């Protein structure tokens, strides 16, 4: 049984993988569910190395997703992204329920309120990492989803329930 120790997850048996591993972490000031998902029962050493490197740099990748959110918001033509997420919640809840004040830019306030709640890693999939952002899970079941590749580069942003 080849054991390998991964940051955040500890020792895993790379020849008899479980389908899912999860833990709660505190990173960049947020409590985040971190889950690791496999579709196969084993993982190649090269994939394990990529996964290990990604986890070692997780805080940097998280900061990069914040940049993606800001860039997507700035793109007025982005169809199913940050602007859609904000517009939907402002229409459904209104500014009071969102905890916004009327004097400052509402979208700027929302950009400051949105935060990560989950990072899902899929080392044997084309969507390597999935980041879920929200204003609060008690407030909404919709999340802004940022997908990245194994290098932490954006693949797409969407809204899911």
Image (spheres, rainbow, N blue to C red):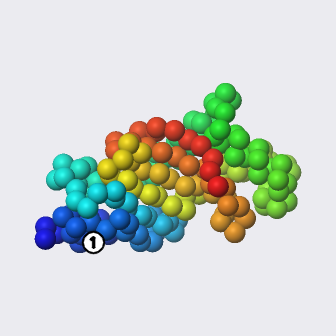
Q: Look at the picture and state if 14 lies above or below 84.
A: below
Q: Secondary structure at mark 1?
A: strand
Q: Quadrant of the C terminus?
A: bottom right
Where residue 126 sits, quadrant-wise, is: top left
Residue 111 at what x, y percent from top left?
A: 66, 48
Query: Which residue matches tag 1?
Result: 10
Q: Residue at x 67, y 61 (%)?
A: 141
Name the residue nearer the viewer: 152 or 13.
13
User: With respect to residue 8, does 106 lie above or below?
Assistant: above
- Observer able to see residue 157: yes
Count of marks overlaid on the render:
1
User: 67 or 84: which is nearer to us?
Assistant: 84
Badge 1 crowding class, 10 Å Cα cut-off, few under 14, some 14 to 19, many 20 or more, is few
Q: Would you identify the image quadrant in which residue 121 lies?
A: bottom left
Q: Residue at left 52%, top 46%?
A: 146
- Report x, y in % for residue 69: 57, 43
Whole-percent x and y of residue 11? 23, 72
Quarter-of-image position of residue 114: bottom right
Horizontally, is 10 left or right of 91 in the view?
left
Q: Is residue 5 visible?
A: no
In the current view of this chain or complex, which residue is farthest to the top?
Answer: 77
Q: Residue reaching furthest front? A: 40
10 to the left or right of 46: right
In the figure, is residue 155 to the left or right of 5? right
Identify the residue at horizontal 31%, vertical 68% (top origin): 18
Q: Position of residue 122 (x, y in %)?
A: 37, 53
Please give the name of the residue rendered at 22% of the width and 67% of the height, measured from the top-left corner.
16
Relative to 92, residue 126 above or below: above
Quarter of the image that includes the N terminus: bottom left
């Amino acid at each position: 049984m080849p054991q390998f120790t991964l940051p955040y997850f500890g020792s895993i048996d790379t020849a008899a993988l479980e389908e899912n591993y999860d833990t709660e972490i505190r990173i960049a000031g947020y409590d985040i569910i971190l889950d690791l998902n496999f579709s196969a029962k084993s993982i190649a050493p090269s994939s394990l190395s990529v996964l290990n490197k990604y986890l070692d740099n997780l805080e940097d990748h998280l900061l990069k997703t914040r940049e993606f959110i800001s860039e997507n918001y700035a793109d007025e033509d982005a169809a199913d992204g940050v602007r859609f997420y904000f517009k939907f919640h402002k229409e459904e809840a209104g500014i009071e329920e969102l905890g916004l004040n009327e004097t400052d830019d509402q979208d700027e306030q929302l950009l400051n309120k949105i935060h990560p709640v989950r990072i899902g890693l899929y080392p044997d999939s084309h969507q390597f990492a999935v980041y879920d952002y929200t204003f609060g899970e008690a407030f909404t079941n919709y999340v802004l989803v940022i997908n990245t590749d194994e290098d932490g580069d954006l693949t797409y942003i969407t809204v899911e329930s």
